[in-house]
Amino acid sequence: MPAIVIIGAQWGDEGKGKATDLLGSRIDYVVKFNGGNNAGHTVVVGSEKYALHLLPSGILTDGVTPIISNGVVVDIEVLFEELDALIARGVDVSKLLVSANAHVITNYHRTLDKVTERFLGKRQIGTTGRGIGPAYADKINRVGIRIQDLFDEKILRQKVEGALDQKNHLLVKVYNRRAIEVEEIVTELLSYAERLRPMVSDTGLLLNQALDRGEVVLFEGGQATMLDVDHGTYPFVTSSSSTSGGAATGSGVAPNRLERVIGIVKAYTTRVGSGPFPTELFDDSGEFLRENGFEFGTTTGRPRRCGWYDAPIARYSARINGVTDFVLTKLDVLTGLKTIPVCVAYDVDGERHDEMPVSQSDFHHAVPIYEEFPGWQEDITGARTFDGLPKNAQDYALAIERMSGARISAIGVGPGRDEIIVRHDLID
C-alpha cells in the first residue's frame, strides 16, 4: 500500500483537509510534516465544523493515528488548547504522537516574530506573528529547542540560555523591549513535560515500520507550493518546505517510498499576506469569490485575496511536486457567474510567458492572459457524479485539467465531507 502526500498547489487554503477526509478509513496514519500553527484546516463533519491549526486533520477520523513529525515547529500551549477543545467535543485524541525531534516554539519566538514584522514597515512579509519563522531560524542556526529537550532540565536550561544570550541584546538594544528571563522560559516548558511525555515517539521509525507492514501513510502538508521557502514566491513565503519533497525531510521517510502526490487546487485562487498575485481581483468579482467561498483565514480571520484560476501556477506545482492527481475544490463557489476567466499565460513587458517567470521582478509585473469559459446557474452541491454536473461546469473542469499538468481525480462541490465527486481512486 502506498505512502501518499497531499500538498496545496497554490498559496494555501485550498481545502487539503477535504482530501484527507475523502481517503478516510483507508488511511492508517496521517502525518503533519511541516509548518506550525500558522495555517489551518477547516473540516466539516455532518453539522459540526472543526478548525484545526497545529493538529493533522486525520485526528478527526476514527482508527487513524495522527502524527506531528520532525519537520513541524510545535507551540505546545496551542497543541494542548486544540486537544482540549476536541476532547470537550467528544473527539478521541489519545492516538496522537509527536516526534521527539520536532522543534518547539517558545515565547521569545512569538515576541521576535511580532516586533520584527512591525520593524519592517512597508516591507512586511505578512506573517501570522506566531513565532514560526524565528523557530525555524533557530533550528537552522542550531540553537533550537526540541521536544526531547523538555525531559532533561539541565540540557533545556543550557539551550535556553544560549538562545537568549543573543536575542535579549536584540530585543533590548534594537527593538527597545524588555529582556526575557531564562527561568521564565524554562519553567513554562517544563510545565508541559508530564502531559507531553506519553505522546512523544521516534515517529520516523514508526512510519517506516508501518510502510513495511503495508499500511497506508498520508503526509499532509501545511501551507502550499507557492509558499515553499525554496520554490515559492520568495521572500513572501513560509519558513518550511511545503512541497512534496518536504514530506521526506520532515518525516524521516525516504523519497522513494512516496508513491502518490495529490495536489489540491481551488477552482479559483486565493492567498493571504503580502506578495505577487497576478490574477488578484479588486472588483465585484473578487468580492463574489470571497463572500461565496467564505474566504477568511482559519487561523487569522483575515480576508483572503481572491483571483481567477491560474493554470501556469498549477503546472508549476505539478512539476515541482510530481503531482499524480489533482483534487479540485470549491467548484460550487463559481455557480452563478456568467463567464469564468482562467489565466492561461502571462504578459511581461509585451512578452508572453506560458510558464511561471523565474525572475521575481517579472512575476511581480506579470499581467494575466485570460481565456473565458461560460458559467452555470444550477446548484451543483447535490452532484455526486461528473455527469451530474451541468455541461458548462464539466467543460470548465476538463479545460483546467488539460492546462494543469495532471488529471483531476476528485471535485469538491460543497463544504461537507460527502459533497465531492470522485473520478479516479486516489489510492489504487
Image (cartoon, helix red, strand yellow):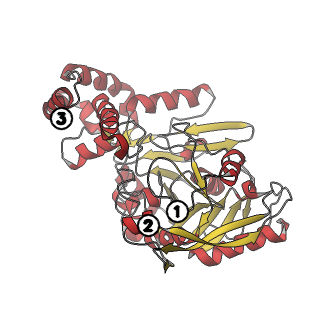
Q: Residue at x 63, y 60 (%)?
A: 268
Q: Which mark is residue 163?
A: 3
Q: Earlier in the sequence, mark 1 or mark 2?
A: 1
Check disc 2 and report the residue beneath it: 363
Task: Return the x and y of residue 230 as percentages of the image width and height.
Answer: 34, 62
Residue at horizontal 31 percent and vertical 41 percent from the top:
120
Residue at the image point whose x is 66% and y is 47% from the top: 290
- Tag 1 residue: 278
Quarter occupied by residue 281? bottom right
Q: Position of residue 322 (x, y in %)?
A: 47, 72
Q: Amino acid at mark 3?
A: Ala
Q: Are marks 1 and 2 in contact (CB under 8 Å)?
A: yes
- Disc number at residue 218? none
> In the displayed structure, does residue 36 sit left or right of residue 14?
left
> Is residue 143 shown left or right of residue 189?
left
- Residue 159 in the image, given as x and y percentages of width and height: 17, 34
Q: Please, what is the three-letter code of the amino acid marked with disc 2?
A: Phe
The vertical placement of 277 against 70, above or below, is below
C-alpha distance separating marks 1 and 2: 8 Å
Classify mark 3: helix, strand or loop.
helix
Question: Could you give the CA–CA distance between mark 3 and mark 1, rounded to whole angstroms?
Answer: 40 Å
Place residue 133 in its image quadrant: top left
Residue furthest front in the image? 350
Task: Using the image as rendered, state which of residue 311 and residue 40 is in the foreground.
Answer: 311
Above or below, 98 against 6 in this view is: above
Label 2: element kind? helix
